[in-house]
Image (spheres, grey):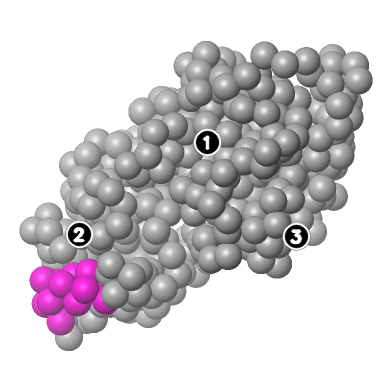
Amino acid sequence: MTTRSWRSGLALLAVTTLTLTACGLDSGESDDTAEPAESAAAEEITGKITFSTLQLKPTFTEYIDGVIDDFEAEYPGTEVEWIDIPFQGAQEKIATDASAGTLPDVINLNPNFAQPLESEGLFVDLDTAVPELREDYVAGAWDAFQVPSQEGSFGFPWYLTSEVTMYNTDEFEAAGLDPETPPATFDELYASATTISESSDGEVYGMHPALENRFMLDLAKEGVPVLADDGTTWTFNTPEAVEHVEKLAELYQDGVFPPDSLTEDHAKETEAYQAGQVALFPSGPNFLTIIEENAPEIAEATGVGPQITGASDAANMSVMGLMVPTSSENQATALKFAEFMTNAENQLAFSKIVTIFPSVKDALADPYFTDDSDGTVESKARRVSAEQLDGAQNLLPVQYDDRVKAIVVGKVQLAMTGDLSAQEALDQAVEEANAVSGN
């Protein structure tokens, strides 16, 4: 697999909604041989641990091996065995290991994978084990590993992604828009997209809706309470959500979105931007490299602005983390290794290999993320993304699995084509989503 593919693949890993059922898990209580989390961090750092990642070999073998070597050198008597799991079959393997009590000592998961296991009590509560570390990390990243209605947080944030707004400055100029002033809110985004579509006589569309990727996330950005506070019941059929769907329907019917875009995913959106068919492209900054390789003329015309926000004023980020199972017999070394892997130095080094962002505040303060004086769009994208991480959150509910997504997107498509009203579409989506979720 090429480095370019991994740049996009690693970001995709961070945002992919993967839901792991808790079927077959035990009560979640730690093994009798495991030491209590409260005392683990104070114990001697020694002995062997296992460390599991999700398909990082062979592209990042040199980096991961280097961090492991540094850890073993700093803590003599330790040994870290690195296990890398392919994406295919990972869900089943983790479920089997969790049921058998044989999870590795440190495991790489995103919140979607982790939360069903967190809710079963299978991971060490870091707010209890290492409370002093919380302030080192971006607050929203640390909080991403919490469980609704439960105390504690269960994962060391590792690396982050956070989208920016890429836009074609040539199309902005052609439409009479200021190429130095990209949209920052939904209202500004839709206004710019409409102006571009109208001025191009149908040759260029303002934007792509990318419903599978953005719809529920955009509702959360607009401050819609998509889930009840306890995380069990879908509640996104609010007046604000109805207004949002009505606006999407208006944009589609007015030709601001491509006519075949309702059923297309993010990959098609990327292709459309690279082909010059759409002018606005909210996505991860890692896609700048892909655009440069596939469409250099479009890349040359690409500007970058902040992530689009709504009524909540919150930016979204996706999070990858490292968890320490309560079943680990060497929690002290496991906790120290997870802390070491995610420290500022190691995260900064990782971020210079692939387009990701560190979760530790000290790393984000490095000039690599703050200095865009070279004038490149890549350095500006890094700065913009890093700045918005301070108040960003993991806004997409982990319960938004493929079953719920299919229901929601299907109903919104019907509203956008006029086959359902926005209220009917959302009411039906909420009812059916709660049914498949067992609510």
Magenta segment range?
420-433
Circles 1 and 3, Cβ within 8 Å, touching? The answer is no
Q: Is residue 217 visible?
A: yes
Examine the rendered structure and indicate whether residue 75 appears above or below residue 429. above
Circles 2 and 3, Cβ within 8 Å, touching? The answer is no
Of the numbered discs in the image, which one, if any, rests on residue 154? 1
Give percent across and percent down for residue 386: 48, 28
Tag 3: amino acid = Pro
Side of 400 where 321 appears, left or right? right
Tag 1: amino acid = Phe
Side of 324 where 302 appears, left or right? left
Q: Which quadrant, please, contains the N terminus?
A: bottom right
Q: Decide whether residue 111 is among the magenta residues.
A: no
Give percent across and percent down for residue 200: 30, 65
Give percent across and percent down for residue 346: 71, 24
Examine the rendered structure and indicate whether residue 325 appears above or below residue 42. below
Q: Decide whether residue 423 is among the magenta residues.
A: yes
Task: Give the Cα distance between marks 2 and 3.
Answer: 35 Å
Q: Which quadrant, please, contains the C terminus?
A: bottom left
Q: Quadrant of residue 60?
A: top right
Of the numbered discs in the image, which one, if any, rests on residue 86? 3
Q: Nearer the viewer, residue 279 or 56?
A: 56
Identify which residue is drawn at 72% across, 16% down: 43
Q: Can you name the residue that lies furthest to the left here? A: 239
Of the numbered discs in the image, which one, if any, rests on residue 235? 2
Task: Give the Cα distance between marks 1 and 3.
Answer: 23 Å
Side of 21 where 98 appears, left or right? right
Give percent across and percent down for residue 388: 40, 30
Tell me if mark 1 has few (under 14), some (14-19) or many (20+) residues whose alpha carbon lies within 10 angstroms of its own. many
Quick one: SS at disc 3? loop
